[in-house]
């Protein structure tokens, strides 16, 4: 299926040619006039509906996201956000406001990290929640590729993780899921759930991370306790297991370092 066909299914007028955009390693993304059309061959059932629900959850909590015009198993039609000025302080303000929110409990609907399916879960102890919902499914999927690191990963979560309180999370906050639009920063392609803010912050530190301008502004608005800082490598293990799953054993070195730093 092409972008024009999805727009026709959505009963939206295609205004101009389809221009390919960067869409990460999973989807093909096109700009067609005011729309961003996102497609993926062989996408697992529920992938695009889960993304749309995550965008709606963030929007309901005050985060700027693209408007969703159409969602189906075949793809998404989103608002195209033009490029605007880089503003790390505004991003810090938006995320600090999100992370300061308190929800009634930890919870996650069935969803995805990339195309990897994750189960739903609700309530209970944070460390158990994080391990069973996020880490254990990826640990089982990658066990045979970990070269003996599997038991070391399991052992990380026998110690309690710090708990500031249930907060809404983007869930996959790398620089490719950030867009600086004319109205300010916007977040894309969430893996939304309610957990601890260290999960988002850990991803933001991996693979080059976000610049010091962001971290200075964020810390000024919402300081990081030392115990949360120390826990970030344990949260990062979650994302490194996903990279082992998707991209192979070249990520065992960073995984070993995260374990050692924990």
Image: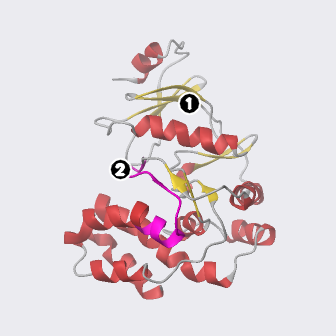
Is residue 69 among what the camera can see?
A: yes
Dot 1: element: strand
Determine which quarter of the picture holds residue 220.
bottom right
- Give the number of the disc on residue 191: none
The image position of residue 206, as x and y in percent, is: 50, 69
Where does label 2 land, which residue?
A: 117
Q: What's the residue at 56%, 70% (across, down)?
A: 205
Q: Say if the magenta span includes residue 118.
A: yes
Q: Residue furthest bottom?
A: 260
**Quadrant in the picture for the N terminus:** top left
Dot 2: element: strand
Q: What's the residue at 59%, 67% (across, down)?
A: 201
Q: Is residue 68 above or below residue 91?
A: above
Nearest the viewer among 136 and 260 is: 136
Give whichever of discs 2 and 1 has the lower sequence position.
Answer: 1
Determine which quarter of the picture holds residue 153.
bottom left
**Dot 1: within a 10 Å radius of its alpha carbon, few (fewer than 14), some, or many (20 or more) residues?**
many
- Give the number of the disc on residue 78: 1
In the rendered structure, the answer to whether residue 15 lies left or right of residue 139 reads right
């Amino acid at each position: 299926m092409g972008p024009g066909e999805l727009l026709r299914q959505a009963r939206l007028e295609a205004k101009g040619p389809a221009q390919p955009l960067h869409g990460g390693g999973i989807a093909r993304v096109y700009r067609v006039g005011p729309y961003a059309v996102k497609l993926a061959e062989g996408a697992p059932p529920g992938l695009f509906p889960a993304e749309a629900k995550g965008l709606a959850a963030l929007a309901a909590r005050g985060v700027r996201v693209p408007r969703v015009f159409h969602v189906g198993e075949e793809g998404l039609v989103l608002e195209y956000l033009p490029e605007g000025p880089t503003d790390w302080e505004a991003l810090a303000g938006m995320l600090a406001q999100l992370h300061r929110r308190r929800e009634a409990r930890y919870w996650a609907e069935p969803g995805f990290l990339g195309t990897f399916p994750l189960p739903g879960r609700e309530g209970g102890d944070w460390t158990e929640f994080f391990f069973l919902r996020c880490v254990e499914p990826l640990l089982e999927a990658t066990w045979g590729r970990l070269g003996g690191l599997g038991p070391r990963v399991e052992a990380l979560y026998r110690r309690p993780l710090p708990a500031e309180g249930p907060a809404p999370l983007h869930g996959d906050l790398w620089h490719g899921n950030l867009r600086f639009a004319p109205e300010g920063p916007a977040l894309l392609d969430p893996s939304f759930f309610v957990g601890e803010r260290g999960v988002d912050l850990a991803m933001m530190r991996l693979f080059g991370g976000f610049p010091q301008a962001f971290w200075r502004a964020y810390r000024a608005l919402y300081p990081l306790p030392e115990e949360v800082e120390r826990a970030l490598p344990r949260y990062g293990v979650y994302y490194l297991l996903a990279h082992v799953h998707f991209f192979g054993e070249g990520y065992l070195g960073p995984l070993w370092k995260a374990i050692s730093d924990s």
